[in-house]
């Protein structure tokens, strides 16, 4: 229908030019330009143009006897063909646009699905992590429980050992007591009899206080004279290098073990010097009271903690000590 309408319009225009040859000649140059459909799309690809031939216009202007029907039909055919091509291009572009929109929708769907999968994976990972944490907590709980059981067993064993030590009765001969002891040494002098495992503090020429002691085992015994130049309560014990070499487990105390119930020097220590030289031998307490009365030390003189505390209170700096 639109093609026929355009055909009528073009025919009327042609008749107007035929009736005015001068106007036709004046505008012949402009009619050589393409005819643009007023209803055409603004898109250049879909624009419909109908070329006008100058010879056709001249023909219309010079001869009115020619029939215009064939030209009008030819023009209508051109317009129909051009319109069809424009529509084909339009539809082709529409399909391309639809394809692009579908591709974008597919991309968005894929992105949403990827995000959902990521959230699912994250949830799964969280669940796995929680499961692992639960398993580790259970293992840790079992380990702690096992350690507690082991610790309780050790505590019971230690309590039994302590009970056995408490059951051991100290022989009367090693208990602190005042005895008759003849000596020409000045009062306050300390005399250690290693053969009988006794220490005597001279009170006067006929009396002394006797203490039970432990002396150096074979190969570590020491004898001689010295003086007390230092007194320390709950002293720090630093094992000599030779002792660490014999017992590597003592290496952890190479810089000194703080004083306390487990310290080998016990509650107090008297440091023996010969002149200004430290002999490295001590009269000290002990954390192993069962060793009293035996040759068990590395040369030092061990005493019960209560005995060394009593002796500590009686001894002064410069007190003479005789070990024989």
Image: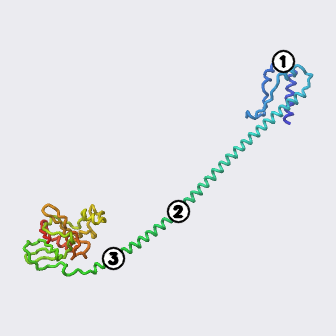
Q: Is residue 118 left or right of residue 143?
A: right
Classed neighbour count for the residue bearing mark 2: other residues with Cα under 10 Å, few (<14), some (14–19), many (≥20): few
- Front position in the image: 257 or 91: 257
Using the image, determine if residue 324 lies above or below residue 238: below
Quarter of the figure with residue 280: bottom left
Assign a secondary structure to mark 3: helix
| Residue 69 locus on image (x, y percent) | 90, 28
Q: Residue at x 16, y 66 (%)?
A: 272
Relative height, residue 43 to residue 187 (above, below): above
Using the image, tell me which numbered label, if any, was put on residue 130.
2
Please name which of the two marks, 3 or 1, marks the residue nearer to the observer.
Answer: 3
Find disc 3 in the rendering and name its residue. Answer: 159
At a point 27% along the width and 66% down the height, the residue shown is 246
| Residue 53 vertical placement versus 45 (above, below) | above
Which mark sits nearer the N-terminus, 3 or 1? 1
The label on residue 22 is: 1
Judged from the image, the secondary structure of the residue bearing numbered disc 1 is helix
**Considering the numbered disc 2 on the image, is that residue within a helix, a strand or a loop?**
helix
User: How is colour applied across the structure in the image?
Assistant: rainbow
Residue 48 x/y as whole percent:
78, 32
Task: Tell me the mark number nearer the camera, choosing from 1 and 2.
Answer: 2
């Amino acid at each position: 229908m639109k093609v026929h309408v355009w055909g009528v319009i073009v025919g009327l225009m042609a008749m107007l030019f035929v009736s005015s040859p001068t106007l036709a000649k004046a505008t012949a140059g402009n009619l050589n330009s393409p005819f643009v459909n007023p209803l055409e799309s603004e898109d250049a690809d879909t624009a419909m143009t109908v070329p006008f031939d100058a010879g056709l216009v001249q023909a219309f202007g010079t001869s009115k006897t020619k029939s215009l029907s064939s030209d009008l039909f030819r023009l209508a055919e051109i317009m129909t063909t051009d319109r069809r091509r424009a529509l084909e291009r339009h539809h082709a572009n529409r399909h391309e646009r639809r394809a692009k929109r579908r591709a974008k929708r597919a991309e968005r769907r894929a992105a949403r699905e990827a995000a959902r999968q990521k959230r699912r994976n994250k949830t799964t990972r969280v669940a796995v992590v929680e499961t692992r944490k639960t398993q580790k907590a259970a293992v840790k709980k079992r380990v702690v429980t096992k350690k507690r059981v082991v610790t309780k067993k050790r505590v019971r064993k230690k309590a039994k050992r302590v009970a056995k030590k408490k059951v051991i009765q100290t022989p009367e001969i090693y208990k602190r007591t005042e005895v008759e002891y003849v000596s020409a040494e000045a009062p306050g002098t300390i005399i250690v009899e290693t053969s009988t495992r006794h220490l005597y503090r001279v009170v006067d020429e006929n009396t002394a206080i006797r203490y039970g002691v432990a002396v150096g085992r074979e190969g570590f015994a020491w004898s001689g004279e010295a003086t007390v130049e230092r007194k320390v309560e709950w002293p720090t014990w630093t094992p000599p290098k030779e002792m660490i070499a014999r017992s590597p487990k003592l290496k952890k105390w190479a810089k000194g073990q703080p004083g306390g119930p487990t310290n080998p020097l016990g509650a107090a220590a008297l440091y023996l010097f010969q002149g200004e030289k430290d002999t490295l031998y001590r009269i000290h307490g002990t954390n192993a009271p069962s060793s009293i009365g035996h040759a068990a030390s590395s040369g030092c003189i061990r005493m019960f903690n209560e005995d060394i505390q009593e002796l500590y209170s009686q001894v002064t700096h410069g007190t003479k000590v005789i070990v024989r």
